[in-house]
Image (cartoon, rainbow, N blue to C red):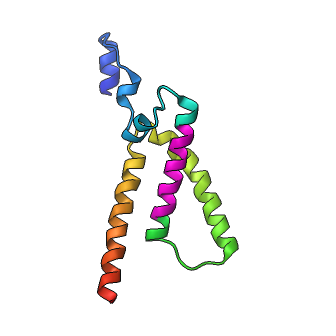
Amino acid sequence: MNLILLMSKGVSVNPSERLSFLPKLFQVDKHPETGMWFLFIAIFILSAIVYNLGFARKLKLWQNVIIYIMLFIGCILLTFLAVFLPVGESLIIAAIVLGLYRYRLHRERN
């Protein structure tokens, strides 16, 4: 809503200022095609890490294939949302929290 108010007052807003950290890192505003591919790969890898740390169980091979195909399809939508929203950053934080949880669980079992 602030963006609409600023634009109605004649203030120019640079879209690259609104980008999240990962899209700025991959320069989505300067090189959109390669930047979006790198962002998609990063989102997919982070989603797979979060899935493995938090939700994965021992499954059959065909079940894992289906899960990763669905994860791949879901990451397409997440990539578009990640341009202006902190999706990648949230996945990084989730991976860190789940990694610490797994580490503490492993330490207490031993």
The percent coordinates of residue 64 (x first, y second) are: 63, 70
Q: Does the magenta run of residues contain 43?
A: yes
The structure residue drawn at horizontal position 37% and vertical position 49%, both measured from the top left corner, is 89
Side of 13 relative to 77 (left or right)? left
The structure residue drawn at horizontal position 36% and vertical position 30%, both measured from the top left corner, is 18
The structure residue drawn at horizontal position 37% and vertical position 67%, both measured from the top left corner, is 98
Side of 99 relative to 45 (left or right)? left
Q: Is residue 30 above or below residue 67?
A: above
What are the residue bounds of the magenta stretch?
36-50
The structure residue drawn at horizontal position 48% and vertical position 32%, both measured from the top left corner, is 28
Q: Is residue 92 above or below residue 78?
A: below
Residue extending furthest toward the bottom: 110
Is 26 in front, or is 18?
26
The percent coordinates of residue 55 (x first, y second) are: 48, 71
Residue extending furthest toward the right: 62
- The quadrant of the rendering that contains the C terminus is bottom left
- The quadrant of the rendering that contains the N terminus is top left
Is 42 in front, or is 51?
42
The percent coordinates of residue 109 (x first, y second) are: 33, 88
Dominant SS type (magenta): helix
Q: Is residue 10 above or below residue 26?
A: above
Side of 40 relative to 15 (left or right)? right
The percent coordinates of residue 54 (x first, y second) are: 43, 70
Q: Is residue 89 above or below residue 8?
A: below
Q: Does the magenta run of residues contain 44?
A: yes
Residue extending furthest toward the top: 10
